[in-house]
Amino acid sequence: MLNFNIRGENIEVTQAIRDYVQKRVGKLQKFFDNNVDSIAHVNLKIHPDKTAKVEVTIPLPYLVLRAEETSPDMYASVDLVTDKLERQIRKYKTKVNRKSREKGFKAIDFAATDETVAAADNDQDDKLDVVRTKRVSLKPMDNEEAILQMDMLGHDFFIYEDAETDAINIVYRRNDGRYGLIETGDDQ
């Protein structure tokens, strides 16, 4: 079941907006298993130039869906972000189904991790401060699933547990647009 946490910045979240968000984003429920309980975190923001930004994050046991859209109309932004999330789900399911057919798995239980972000604040004293910390739960997957997850989250790197070696690995996007892999292990 999909529950909603709807917040507004510079806007009062009226019942009409809340109902519309729940109706549109709630349609994504058809793609999830019936036993999946998740909270859709929806952030609605009105900028000073009167544009409306909608951000939606849905953490699932096997995937983290995230999308944002900005347009002159709040309802249009909700529609656009819902369409973007649906495309992400379809892309992910297609990739997983193809992968399972290639490897001969009956069912694949891939899991996503929360994003891991550590940022450096480079002030005048050249001091390095960690400004954000996130805890991750790593689930086994191969590097192709990790790259797909990284792309869906819009990140430049992704940390995961390799399904074959149980090692913690990192995939990242290179400046040339291709991908790199950092492997960990004892045989370095």
Image (cartoon, rainbow, N blue to C red):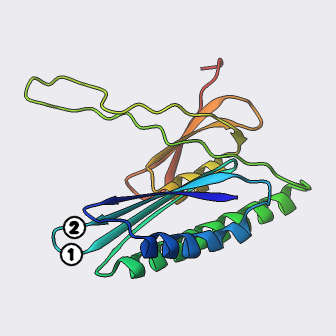
Q: Residue at x 83, y 58 (%)?
A: 100
Distance of mark 2 from mark 1, alpha carbons? 5 Å
Verify CB contact (< 8 Å) between mark 2 and mark 1: yes
Amino acid type shown at disc 2: His
Q: Which residue is mark 2?
A: 47
Amino acid type shown at disc 1: Lys
* Image position, residue 41 (x, y; %): 49, 55
* Image position, residue 161 (x, y; %): 66, 35
Q: Residue at x 48, y 79 (%)?
A: 79
Q: Is residue 131 shown above or below 55?
A: above
Q: Which residue is mark 1?
A: 50
Quarter that holds the N terminus: bottom right
Q: Residue at x 73, y 71 (%)?
A: 30
Q: Residue at x 64, y 35 (%)?
A: 138
Q: Nearer the viewer, residue 119 or 66?
A: 66
**How many neighbours does mark 1 have within 10 angstroms: few (below 14), some (14-19), or many (20 or more)?**
few
Task: Spot the residue most to the front.
Answer: 15
Q: Is residue 150 shown above or below 128?
A: below
Q: Is residue 97 shown above or below 36?
A: below
Element type where label 1 sits in the image = loop
